[in-house]
Image (spheres, helix red, strand yellow):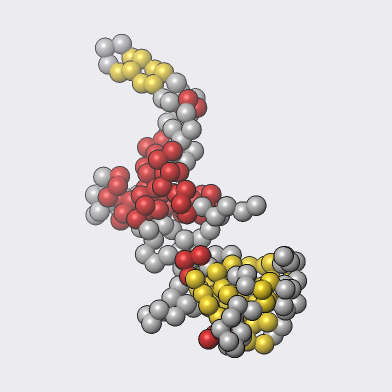
Amino acid sequence: MSRWGYRFTRVVTPAPSLALVSVDQAKAALGIDPADTSNDATLAAQIDAVSAAINNWCDRIFVVQTYRDQLRGACGWTGEPLVVRQYPIVVDDGGVPLVSVAEDGGALDPTLLEVFPEQGAVYRLDASMVPSAWGAALVVVDYTSGFDPIPSDVQAACLEWLTLRWHAVGRDPALRSETIPDLITQVYAGDAGAGTSGGAMPAGAQDMLYPYKIWTV
């Protein structure tokens, strides 16, 4: 079976924000009064940081954006799907996937494309509706993909990590044990286990994100 020569993916219409949760959601998780705006800027920065880290770990962008994939060197892929870089592909109110394909500058008839939005898979069909080969030197795919709304488990993972980071602010990361006689004893897990510090993804969040991670070979 033939392989693509290479692929470029670029964002055509970026989202206003890549944040996975809102400031109000973060306040609710942290027990901050919704009317208290004194930490809004800091919260927004923390949300952006955690959201970016989750996107990077999952190797995908969760919010809805419009993309263009350009693939060169396609030849002889009969019955094989073209899988876009970002998915799921968004469908319109009528259930039609928001995707178009051109081969060597010529737009393909959308009725001769079979699309599986959840997997981002696009099949090329011939006039008899039989899977046909991708045979162009240049294939261009324009599509809209992402989740709307963001899945609840992804948001839960974001808030769990955000909470750890928020409570770790100002804490000495080197502190392992501290005892003040008759008053307090503190022991921080530190490096004792993965996901126990504010900087590392907590194990519970990672478990929730595993189904969304795109694994590449």
Instruction: Please determine whether, in this image, residue 46 is positioned above or below residue 16.
Output: above
What residue sits 47% from the left and 61% below the top?
62
Q: Nearer the viewer, residue 47 or 172?
A: 47
Q: How many numbered callouts? A: 0
- Quarter of the image containing the N terminus? bottom right
Q: Position of residue 197 (x, y in %)?
A: 45, 33
**Residue 49 appearing in the image:** no
Residue at the spot 51% in from the left edge and 52% down from the top edge: 213
- Give the image quarter of residue 176: top left
Q: Can residue 25 be seen in this view?
A: yes
Residue drawn at point x = 36 percent, y = 21 percent: 186
Closer-to-camera residue (22/208): 208
- Residue 139, by quadrant, is bottom right
Please say if 112 is above or below 78.
below
Residue at (53% x, 58% y) in the render: 60
Residue 54 image position (x, y, % from top left): 49, 51
Identify the residue at the far top of this view: 181
Say whether residue 194 is left or right of residue 73: left
Residue 150: x and y in percent read 39, 61
- In the rendered image, the vertical position of residue 35 relative to residue 89, given as above or below: above
Image check: 205 left or right of 100? left
- Which residue occupies the foreground of this view, 196 or 131? 131
In the rendering, at what x and y percent does residue 143 appear?
A: 54, 75
Q: In this view, does 207 lie to the left or right of 79?
A: left
